[in-house]
Image (cartoon, rainbow, N blue to C red):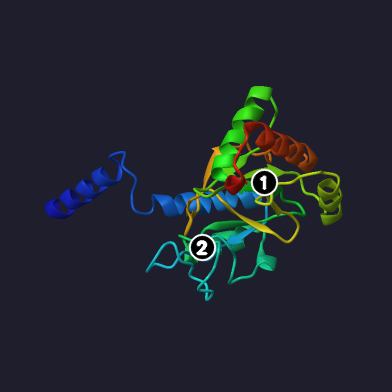
């Protein structure tokens, strides 16, 4: 009996020594997914995990997938939900799955651009004192969350501009985006600008303000063509 109790104490001490346990990351994922779905009312679903034989490859059937691990597959995007029971079931059965946001509708949309260009643009916007919402970062691209917009609204916005960098991507109605703290084939997804703590859904700006500011910032910072 003493030997058994001693083993239990040693096990508990290893769990509470301040170092993350093997399941901490998985608990963080399900906790984040539940926050997005139930507190912020953002529809989410699990993404395809990266291929375990090569993290730069996707677990989906497409050998040339351009967003490995960072997209929905089974279930499809239409299954995205805010239902806590479904979210908990998904991540209990797939605890390492990336968290995928179905953009548009009740959820934010996003404007994304290459990481280096985004870093320079955000630095300039900070100096100007522009208010931005949450910003999601992966090693390759950063995404600025914006209010939901229609395709007609986006079309009118882009048509009115003389120049829009070709590398800007728009995640609107029917789109998706990997949310922190997901791990995808492109690397870790994190908050570059985290939402303020609290139960209310984060504030996000209009798409017009973000596109205007980002295009102007990229032009003024002189980002080279390959980075655009």
Against 55, is 171 above or below?
Answer: above
Q: Position of residue 3 (x, y in %)?
A: 12, 53
**Is any part of residue 142 visible from this angle?**
no
Numbered circle sitting on residue 40: 1
Q: Position of residue 179 (x, y in %)?
A: 57, 51
Query: For the image shown, how many numbered marks are present on the structure?
Result: 2
Asked whether 164 or 186 is in front, the reply is 164
Q: Position of residue 109 (x, y in %)?
A: 71, 49
Against 212, is 27 above or below?
Answer: below
Against 207, is 96 above or below?
Answer: below
Mark 2 crowdedness (10 Å alpha carbons): few <14, some 14-19, many ≥20: many
Residue 7 in the figure: left or right of residue 49: left
Residue 110 in the figure: left or right of residue 208: left
Q: Which residue is mark 2?
A: 69
Q: Position of residue 56 (x, y in %)?
A: 44, 62
Distance, label 1 to label 2, CA atoms, is 24 Å
Q: Quadrant of the N terminus?
A: bottom left
Residue 151 in the figure: left or right of residue 90: right
Q: Secondary structure at mark 1?
A: loop
Q: Residue at x 20, y 47 (%)?
A: 10
Instruction: Examine the image and state in which quarter residue 79 appears.
Output: bottom right
Asked whether 120 or 15 is in front, the reply is 120
Q: Residue at x 44, y 54 (%)?
A: 26
Looking at this rendering, what residue extends furthest in the left direction? Answer: 3
Instruction: Examine the image and state in which quarter residue 199 appears.
Output: top right
Asked whether 225 or 173 is in front, the reply is 225
**Is any part of residue 162 visible from this angle?**
yes
Q: Residue at x 48, y 70 (%)?
A: 59
């Amino acid at each position: 009996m003493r030997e058994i109790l001693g083993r239990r104490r040693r096990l508990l001490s290893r769990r509470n020594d301040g170092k993350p346990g093997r399941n901490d990351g998985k608990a963080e994922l399900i906790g984040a997914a539940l926050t997005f779905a139930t507190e912020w009312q953002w529809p989410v679903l699990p993404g395809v995990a990266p291929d375990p034989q090569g993290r730069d490859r996707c677990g989906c059937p497409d050998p040339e997938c351009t967003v490995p691990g960072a997209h929905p597959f089974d279930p499809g995007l239409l299954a995205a939900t805010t239902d806590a029971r479904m979210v908990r079931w998904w991540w209990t059965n797939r605890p390492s799955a990336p968290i995928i946001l179905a953009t548009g509708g009740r959820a934010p949309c996003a404007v994304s651009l290459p990481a280096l260009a985004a870093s320079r643009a955000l630095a300039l916007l900070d100096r100007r004192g522009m208010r931005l919402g949450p910003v999601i970062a992966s090693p390759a691209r950063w995404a600025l969350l914006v209010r939901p917009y229609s395709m007609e609204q986006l079309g009118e916005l882009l048509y009115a501009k003389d120049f829009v960098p070709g590398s800007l991507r728009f995640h609107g109605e029917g789109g998706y985006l990997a949310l922190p703290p997901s791990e995808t084939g492109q690397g870790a997804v994190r908050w570059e600008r985290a939402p303020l703590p609290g139960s209310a859904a984060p504030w996000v700006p209009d798409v017009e303000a973000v596109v205007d500011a980002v295009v102007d910032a990229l032009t003024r910072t002189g980002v080279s063509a390959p980075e655009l």
